[in-house]
C-alpha cells in the first residue's frame, strides 16, 4: 500500500468517525483519511476523476440513504473500483451480514470493540496488514 | 340371565343386565366430544357417534354401512388414512397419535390426530376397528403462530438491545477521550463527575444485557443435558477471579444433573459473584455445596458477608431491586430475579437464610429428573 494514497472511511456516526480519526492520529498513520457519510457519498467520491483513488475502503454497514451492502454491491460491479480492498468496520456481528459481505467480496470484517484501546489495536492491525499486502494499481 | 360385571380398565361399575351395559356404553360414546368411528374388517362403518355427525356435517343415512372412504361424498378417501387402516393397523393392535392433514371439501384444510384400535371380539367374530378423531387444526395453527411470535420477539429483543447500546458506546468513548485530554486540568470533583458518567454508561449497558437475558429465558426449545456441576462451578469461580482476601471453596463433590447448562451457569455466576461483590469482612469465605434427597437436589452458596435483613428476603428477588445505594455497589438489580426465574423454570425453589453482620446462605432446589416436589411427573 502506497503511504500517499488515501483511505476512505464510509461511516455516518459522528463519534465513530472521530474514533477512527483519533486512532489514525494516535498511530501516526501517514495515509490521509477521507470521511463520507453514506454509500451514496462514497460512490460520488469514488467516481470523481479529480479525487485520488483510495487504496483501502473502511465500510460501515448501517447507514441512511444508501447502506453499506448496497454501496458494496455497486463498487464490486464497477470495473475501475472493484479491486479496491474493502474492510467492513461495523457493530453488527449478525451472521447474515457476515455472509452477504463475503459473498460480495470483502477482504475483512471487523466488529468494533467497545473499548477504545482495543479499537486502536484493531486499526493498527488493519493498517499494518495492508501496508504489507500488495494491491493492483488503480486502472 | 345375569352376566357378571366386565372388569373393564378403570370402569368398575356394577352392570347387571347386558342391555344396560350397551345403553351405558352408548351414553358415553354419544356424550364424548371426540368423533368416533367403528368399522368392520372390510372398513365399512358399523356405527359412529353424534360428535362425528356434527363435526363432519354428515348424517347417519349417509354413514352407516358405507365404506369409510366413501363417507361425506368421498371426503375420507385420504391416502394417509388408507395407510393407517390397510398397512399399519393390521400389523399392530393399536396405533395412537397418527396425524393426517387433508383439505375437506366442506370444512376446508384440517389437521387431525387419529387413534386406531382393533377391537377383538369373542365367538369367532372378526375384529372391529375403532377410530377416534381429534381435530387439532386450531392447536397446530396456534403453535405455528407462537413459534413465529417468539422468533420475532427474539429478533426484536436483539436489535433493540443492539440499537440501545449504540449511543452508549459513543458516550463512553467521548468521555474517555475527554478524560484523557483534560486529565491535568480537572479538579477532583470534575474527575469524579467524569467517572460517574462512565459508570452510568456501563450500568445502562449491563441493564440492557440483563433485560435481554431475562426476556430470553423460558423460550421453549432450550435443551436439557447432563451437566457436571463440579466443573461448571470451578469454571465460574475462575471467571469471577475473586480477590485474594476471599476464599471460595466447594464442600464435597457437586453432582452431575440434568438441566439447561447456560441457565444454571447463570445462577451460580450470579450467586457467587454477589457473595464476592458484597463481601465486607477482611477475610471472606464463600462455600458452595449440595444436599441430596430422594426427589431433589438442594444447592447452597454461603458467605460470611454483611447479611440481609429479614424484611428484604422477598423483595430482593424482584427485578431491579437493590439493597445498597447504587453508587456504593455497582448492581443492576436483575441478577437475583434471573436466579429465581431460572430455578422456577427447572421446577425448583430459591430461598435464603441470613443473619445481619454474620452472613447469608442462598439455597435453591432442583427436582431430580422426572419429578416435581409435589410428586408430579415432569
Image (cartoon, grey):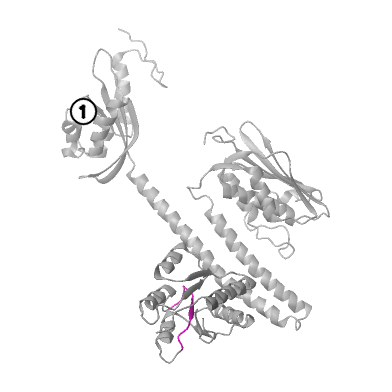
- Mark 1: give few (<14), some (14-19) or many (20+) Cα within 10 Å: some
What residue is rendered at 70% in x and 54% in y? B273
* Residue A108 image position (x, y, % from top left): 49, 70
What residue is rendered at 31% in x and 13% in y? B17
What residue is rendered at 65% in x and 49% in y? B268
The residue stretch that appears in magenta: A52-64
* Residue B361 image position (x, y, % from top left): 73, 45
Count of numbered circles on the image: 1
* Residue B348 image position (x, y, % from top left): 60, 41
Task: Using the rendered image of the protein, determine whether residue B169 is visible from the camera's viewpoint.
Answer: yes
Of all chains, the one bearing label 1 is: B
Nearest the viewer among B148 and A76 is: A76
Task: Using the rendered image of the protein, determine whether residue B130 is visible from the camera's viewpoint.
Answer: no
- Corner quadrant of residue B169: bottom right
Nearest the viewer among B17 and A124 is: A124
The chief SS type of the magenta part is loop
Which residue extends farthest top? B1
The reply, left or right, for residue A131 in relation to residue B91 is right
Residue B195 belongs to magenta span = no
Nearest the viewer among B126 and A120 is: A120
The reply, left or right, for residue A98 in relation to residue B243 is left
In the image, residue A89 sits, relative to residue B85, either above or below, namely below
In the image, residue A83 sits, relative to residue B33, either above or below, namely below
Q: Secondary structure at mark 1?
A: loop
Q: Quadrant of the N terminus of chain B?
A: top left
Query: Which residue is the site of mark 1?
Result: B43
The reply, left or right, for residue B111 in relation to residue B70 is right
The reply, left or right, for residue A39 in relation to residue B262 is left
Which residue extends farthest bottom? A50
Residue A53 belongs to magenta span = yes
* Residue B110 image position (x, y, % from top left): 28, 44
Amino acid at each position: 500500500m502506497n503511504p500517499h494514497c488515501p483511505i476512505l472511511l464510509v461511516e455516518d456516526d459522528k463519534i465513530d468517525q472521530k474514533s477512527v480519526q483519533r486512532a489514525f492520529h494516535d498511530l501516526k498513520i501517514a495515509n490521509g483519511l477521507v470521511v463520507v457519510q453514506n454509500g451514496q457519498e462514497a460512490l460520488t467520491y469514488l467516481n470523481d476523476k479529480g479525487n485520488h483513488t483510495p487504496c483501502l475502503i473502511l465500510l460501515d454497514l448501517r447507514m441512511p440513504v444508501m447502506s453499506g451492502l448496497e454501496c458494496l454491491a455497486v463498487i464490486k460491479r464497477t470495473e475501475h473500483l472493484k479491486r479496491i480492498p474493502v474492510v467492513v468496520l461495523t457493530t453488527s456481528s449478525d451472521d447474515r451480514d457476515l455472509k452477504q459481505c463475503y459473498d460480495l467480496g470483502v477482504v475483512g470484517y471487523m466488529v468494533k470493540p467497545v473499548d477504545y484501546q482495543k479499537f486502536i489495536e484493531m486499526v493498527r492491525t488493519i493498517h499494518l496488514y495492508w501496508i504489507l499486502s500488495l494491491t493492483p494499481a488503480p486502472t | 340371565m345375569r352376566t357378571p360385571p366386565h372388569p373393564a380398565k378403570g370402569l368398575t361399575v356394577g352392570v347387571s343386565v347386558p342391555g344396560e351395559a350397551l345403553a351405558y356404553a352408548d351414553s358415553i360414546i354419544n356424550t364424548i366430544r371426540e368423533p368416533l368411528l367403528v368399522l368392520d374388517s372390510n372398513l365399512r362403518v358399523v356405527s359412529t357417534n353424534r360428535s362425528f355427525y356434527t363435526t363432519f356435517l354428515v348424517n347417519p343415512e349417509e354413514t352407516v354401512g358405507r365404506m369409510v372412504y366413501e363417507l361425506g361424498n368421498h371426503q375420507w378417501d385420504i391416502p394417509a388414512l388408507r395407510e393407517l387402516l390397510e398397512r399399519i393397523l393390521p400389523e399392530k393392535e393399536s396405533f395412537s397419535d397418527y396425524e393426517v392433514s387433508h383439505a375437506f371439501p366442506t370444512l376446508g384444510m384440517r389437521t387431525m390426530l387419529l387413534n386406531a384400535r382393533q377391537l377383538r371380539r369373542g365367538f369367532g367374530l372378526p375384529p372391529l376397528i375403532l377410530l377416534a378423531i381429534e381435530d387439532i387444526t386450531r392447536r397446530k395453527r396456534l403453535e405455528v403462530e407462537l413459534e413465529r411470535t417468539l422468533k420475532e420477539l427474539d429478533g426484536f429483543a436483539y436489535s433493540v438491545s443492539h440499537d440501545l447500546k449504540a449511543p452508549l458506546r459513543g458516550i463512553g468513548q467521548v468521555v474517555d477521550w475527554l478524560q484523557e485530554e483534560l486529565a491535568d486540568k480537572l479538579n477532583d470533583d470534575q474527575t469524579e463527575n467524569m467517572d460517574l458518567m462512565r459508570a452510568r454508561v456501563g450500568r445502562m449497558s449491563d441493564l440492557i444485557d440483563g433485560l435481554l437475558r431475562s426476556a430470553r429465558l423460558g423460550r421453549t426449545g432450550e435443551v436439557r443435558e447432563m451437566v457436571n456441576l463440579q466443573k461448571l462451578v470451578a469454571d465460574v469461580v475462575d471467571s469471577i477471579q475473586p480477590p485474594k482476601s476471599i476464599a471460595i471453596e466447594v464442600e464435597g463433590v457437586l453432582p452431575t444433573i440434568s438441566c439447561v447448562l447456560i441457565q444454571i451457569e447463570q445462577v451460580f455466576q450470579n450467586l457467587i459473584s454477589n457473595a464476592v461483590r458484597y463481601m465486607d469482612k477482611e477475610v471472606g469465605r464463600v462455600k458452595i455445596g449440595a444436599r441430596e434427597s430422594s426427589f431433589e437436589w438442594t444447592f447452597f452458596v454461603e458467605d460470611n458477608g454483611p447479611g440481609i435483613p429479614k424484611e428484604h428476603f422477598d423483595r430482593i428477588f424482584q427485578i431491579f431491586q437493590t439493597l445498597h445505594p447504587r453508587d456504593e455497589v455497582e448492581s443492576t438489580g436483575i441478577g437475583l430475579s434471573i436466579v429465581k426465574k431460572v430455578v422456577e423454570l427447572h421446577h425448583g425453589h430459591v430461598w435464603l437464610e441470613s443473619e445481619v453482620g454474620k452472613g447469608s446462605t442462598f439455597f435453591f432446589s432442583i427436582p431430580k429428573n422426572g419429578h416435581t416436589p409435589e410428586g408430579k411427573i415432569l
